[in-house]
């Protein structure tokens, strides 16, 4: 069976705006295609921007366009978070959370990733704190203690870095969607935000 590989990053605003589209694509085509969901590692280490006036002004200049184009909500609480000089908008911690949930509750991995982004963009919560994830873990009946033990463990961080490396073979930006055919050949379906109707038409043609 052909496979759709979808690559996103929890810190990526256009990925957040694209969540409803990819969810619809999965609901329509999950019987026609296998789906693989990868996190990309957009902002890591020193490349992760820290909150402050500079980031706040940059986000305020760019996020409204994404929100208007996609319909995804960006709240004042998120804009306030971008002012927090103690917070680095690192992809590592939320990506490690998503990688772990793919093991603990694989059926909920994409829904969990979608909710992680909502927690930041709507509720303005930091993604480097356990408290942020507890309501989501309860929602998906994932044991909080198991999550806490494994989340930032050496093993889980190693698996997260391995996923970043795998994703980097496919994606130069986020979101990215790739088609893998039966001969393990890869074809780019989308590099960036895509229109749902156009993608549905394309995937129907490729079945």
Image (spheres, helix red, strand yellow):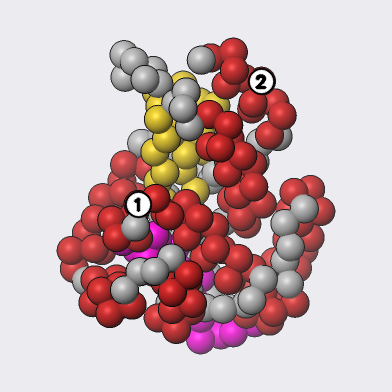
- The magenta region covers 82-100
Q: Which residue is mark 1?
A: 106
Upstream in sequence: badge 1 or badge 2: 1
Which SS class for mark 2? helix
Residue 44 visible in the shown view: no
Which SS class for mark 1? helix
**Relative to 72, is 133 on the left or the right?**
left
> Is 200 within the magenta?
no
> Is 83 within the magenta?
yes
Q: Does 11 appear above or below 110? A: below
Residue 80 sits in quarter: bottom right
- Residue plotted at (31% across, 19% down): 184
Which one is closest to the eye, mark 1 or mark 2? 1
| Mark 1 surroundings within 10 Å by alpha-carbon count, few (fewer than 14), some (14 through 19), many (20 or more) | some
Q: Which residue is mark 2?
A: 201
Q: How many discs appear?
A: 2
Residue 182 sits in quarter: top left
């Amino acid at each position: 069976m052909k496979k759709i590989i979808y690559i996103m990053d929890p810190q990526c605003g256009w990925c957040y705006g694209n969540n409803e589209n990819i969810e619809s694509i999965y609901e329509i085509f999950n019987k026609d295609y296998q789906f693989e969901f990868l996190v990309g590692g957009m902002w890591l280490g020193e490349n992760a921007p820290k909150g402050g006036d500079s980031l706040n002004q940059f986000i305020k200049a760019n996020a409204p366009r994404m929100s208007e184009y996609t319909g995804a909500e960006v709240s004042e609480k998120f804009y306030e978070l971008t002012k927090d000089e103690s917070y680095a908008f690192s992809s590592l911690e939320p990506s490690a959370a998503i990688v772990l949930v793919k093991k603990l509750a694989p059926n909920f991995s994409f829904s969990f990733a979608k909710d992680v982004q909502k927690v930041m963009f709507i509720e303005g919560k930091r993604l480097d704190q356990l408290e942020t994830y507890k309501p989501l873990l309860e929602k998906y009946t994932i044991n909080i203690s198991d999550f806490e033990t494994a989340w930032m463990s050496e093993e889980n961080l190693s698996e997260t870095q391995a996923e970043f490396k795998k994703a980097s073979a496919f994606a130069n930006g986020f979101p990215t969607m790739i088609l893998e055919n039966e001969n393990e050949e890869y074809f780019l379906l989308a590099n960036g935000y895509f229109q749902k109707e156009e993608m549905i038409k394309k995937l129907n043609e490729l079945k």
